């Protein structure tokens, strides 16, 4: 009997435990399902609240912390500031320059070939300097400067290397993306400012208002023109790269690098400055000399007449006795 009761109690205990475990598991699944539905609902609401095309800007970096930066789906970089992601252009704006030195048996033919390479790449020749000696044709050297699209600079360098024996090649790139973005933004702001001033000018009713507004409009238009000039210069430098190619004959010597420091370079710069100062002084004297001669011819007689007139005036006063004071009569002696 005692064994039967013990077995019955064990069965009841196991059954109750199973029921409790089942209830807990069901509650956990329901809670997990509810949390998932809630998260899904929040995600759906967030996606719906963000305009289409602004998802990249709404994204944040790893961990979901604003201000950590991230990368968009198109591969362009993002930077953050004050928790907001700012778009940067995917392509960088660079000013590319390169220099190359070649040796060739026929310098003129090599220079013509490099010019043809530049024109075929959509560029042009911006400078050419050929230094040749008829008595020493093997000492000929030439320098040709070409401008080619920046994206084709590497291909142009590769093709130019085939036109002679390469002595050296150097290339440099300066990233001016931030400068370009800054200038573009300032141009946009300046244009908006000019438009506002023009609208104020159309509403002016008095002459004083018109004069003040026109003065301000002229100043802002001058600032806009300066910014537009910077924008055009940056566009030219970033769209076209500069390649300088020096072509040497077999016996030509490459020009040594110019020294910029030391006693002799300093002496040379001082002498050049002195010569420039003397040239400026002589030029100034040459400009003023005709005016001085004409002035002497015109003012000389006038000055002489004025001097003679003032010299005669005292003499006439002496002859008439006007300059002498009347003398007192001496008393006669008494007795």
Image (cartoon, helix red, strand yellow):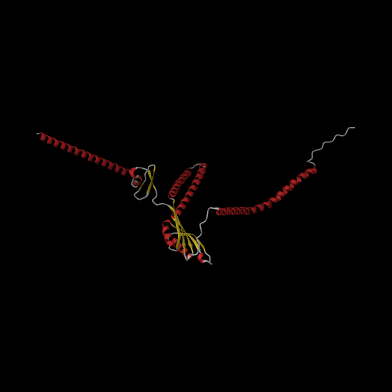
Q: Nearer the viewer, residue 215 or 145?
A: 145
Tell me the quarter of the image containing the C terminus: top right
In the rendered image, the residue lying farthest to the right is 335
Q: Nearer the viewer, residue 236 or 75?
A: 75
Q: Position of residue 98 (x, y in %)?
A: 45, 57
Residue drawn where x is 14% and y is 36% of the image: 10
Q: How many marks?
A: 0
In the rendered image, the residue lying farthest to the left is 1
Q: Using the rendered image of the protein, determine whether residue 161 is visible from the camera's viewpoint.
A: yes
In the rendered image, the residue lying farthest to the front is 3
Q: Position of residue 221 (x, y in %)?
A: 49, 47
Q: Position of residue 145 (x, y in %)?
A: 48, 59
Q: Position of residue 196 (x, y in %)?
A: 46, 44
Residue drawn where x is 37% and y is 48% of the image: 77
Tell me the quarter of the image containing the N terminus: top left
Residue 162 in which image quadrant: bottom left
Q: Nearer the viewer, residue 201 or 127?
A: 127
In the rendered image, the residue lying farthest to the top is 335
Q: Using the rendered image of the protein, determine whether residue 50 is visible from the camera's viewpoint.
A: no
Q: Nearer the viewer, residue 110 or 127?
A: 110
Residue 327 in which image quadrant: top right
């Amino acid at each position: 009997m005692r064994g039967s009761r013990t077995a019955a109690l064990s069965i009841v205990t196991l059954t109750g435990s199973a029921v409790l475990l089942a209830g807990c598991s069901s509650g956990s699944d329901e809670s997990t399902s509810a949390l998932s539905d809630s998260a899904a609902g929040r995600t759906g609401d967030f996606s719906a609240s963000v305009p289409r095309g602004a998802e990249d800007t709404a994204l944040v970096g790893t961990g979901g912390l604003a201000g950590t930066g991230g990368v968009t789906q198109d591969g362009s970089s993002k930077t953050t500031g004050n928790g907001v992601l700012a778009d940067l252009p995917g392509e960088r704006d660079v000013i590319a320059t390169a220099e190359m030195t070649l040796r060739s048996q026929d310098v003129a033919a090599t220079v013509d070939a490099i010019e043809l390479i530049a024109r075929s790449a959509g560029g042009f020749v911006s400078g050419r300097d050929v230094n040749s000696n008829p008595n020493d044709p093997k000492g000929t050297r030439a320098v040709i400067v070409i401008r080619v699209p920046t994206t084709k600079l590497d291909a142009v360098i590769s093709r130019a290397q085939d036109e002679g024996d390469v002595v050296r090649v150097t290339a440099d790139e300066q990233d001016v993306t931030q400068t370009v973005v800054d200038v573009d933004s300032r141009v946009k702001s300046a244009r908006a400012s000019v438009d506002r001033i023009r609208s104020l000018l159309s509403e002016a009713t008095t002459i004083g208002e018109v004069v003040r507004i026109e003065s301000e409009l002229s100043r802002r238009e001058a600032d806009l023109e300066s910014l537009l000039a910077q924008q055009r210069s940056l566009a030219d430098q970033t769209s076209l790269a500069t390649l300088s190619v020096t072509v040497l004959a077999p016996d030509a010597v490459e020009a040594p690098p110019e020294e910029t420091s030391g006693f002799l370079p300093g002496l040379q710069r001082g002498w050049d400055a002195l010569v420039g100062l003397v040239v400026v002084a002589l030029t100034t004297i040459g400009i003023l000399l005709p005016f001085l001669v004409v002035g002497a011819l015109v003012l000389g007689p006038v000055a002489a007449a004025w001097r003679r007139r003032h010299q005669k005036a005292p003499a006439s006063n002496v002859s008439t006795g006007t300059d002498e004071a009347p003398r007192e009569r001496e008393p006669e002696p008494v007795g």
